[in-house]
Image (cartoon, helix red, strand yellow):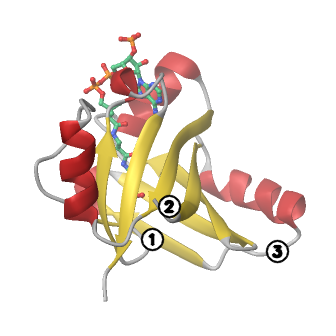
Amino acid sequence: MQKIEHLGIAVSDLEKSKGLFEKLLGSSSYKDELVESENVMTSFFRTGPNKVELLQATSPDSAIAKFIEKRGEGLHHIAFAVQDIRAEMLRLKEEGFTLLSEEPKKGADNKLICFVHPKSANGILIELCQDIA
Ligand code: CMX
């Protein structure tokens, strides 16, 4: 794993939280992106070499809606940058982690992504992301 690529934060009201994070980080969001396949609207901030991703559900079926219903707003996942996502997926699978998909999927911000189930990672949802060249 190369570095923490971003922290994902589940929010109920993206516009309101964008305002809050703009004040907190002292910078503006550089991108809003709808990820239809995941039923989420996202907004990204840069913090030095890392990023913060705010995620708002666009449907009651969204993992973000379920998360907020159960746990409230807050830290949702930690994403690590990887150079070769398929190799990391294989390595983690062999180490006994539970991957949420057999193949990487197209995620937000021009990335190939794969999630590791929080139940196999000390209660933390982990995302792997590889830049799409
Ligand atoms: N962190 C830690 N625990 C979590 C969690 C999270 N983010 N989300 C759910 N859980 C817990 C639940 O509380 C539940 O715990 P209990 O069994 O103790 O009650 C357990 O995990 C199971 O949760 P579930 O909602 O019943 O559902 P699943 O087993 O199907 O969980 C999950 C799958 C949580 C990994 C999935 O729903 C999820 O969050 N996927 C990621 C989706 C996502 O973030 N998409 C955005 C992508 C945007 C991008 O490109 O970056």
**Above or below 39: residue 104:** below
Tag of residue 8: none
Side of 106 relative to 14 (left or right):
left
Q: How crowded is mark 3: few (under 14 residues within 10 Å), some or many (20 or more)?
A: few
Q: Residue at x 28, y 56 (%)?
A: 88
Disc 3 to disc 1, C-alpha distance = 18 Å
Spot occupied by residue 75 in the image (x, y as percentages of width and height):
61, 37
* Residue located 24% across and 29% down the image: 96
> How many residues crowd around disc 1 within 10 Å: few (fewer than 14), some, or many (20 or more)?
some
Q: Nearer the viewer, mark 3 or mark 1?
A: 3
Q: Which mark is residue 33?
A: 1
Depicted 90 relative to depicted 18: above or below: above
**Mark 3 touches mark 1? (CB < 8 Å):** no
Q: Are marks 2 and 1 in contact (CB under 8 Å)?
A: yes
Residue 21 vertical placement versus 62 (above, below): below
Helix, strand or loop for disc 3: loop
Residue 41's spot in the image, x, y percent? Answer: 45, 58
Residue 27: which disc? 3
**Residue 93 showing in the rendered view:** yes
* Residue marked by disc 2: 42
The quadrant of the picture showing ligand 1 is: top left
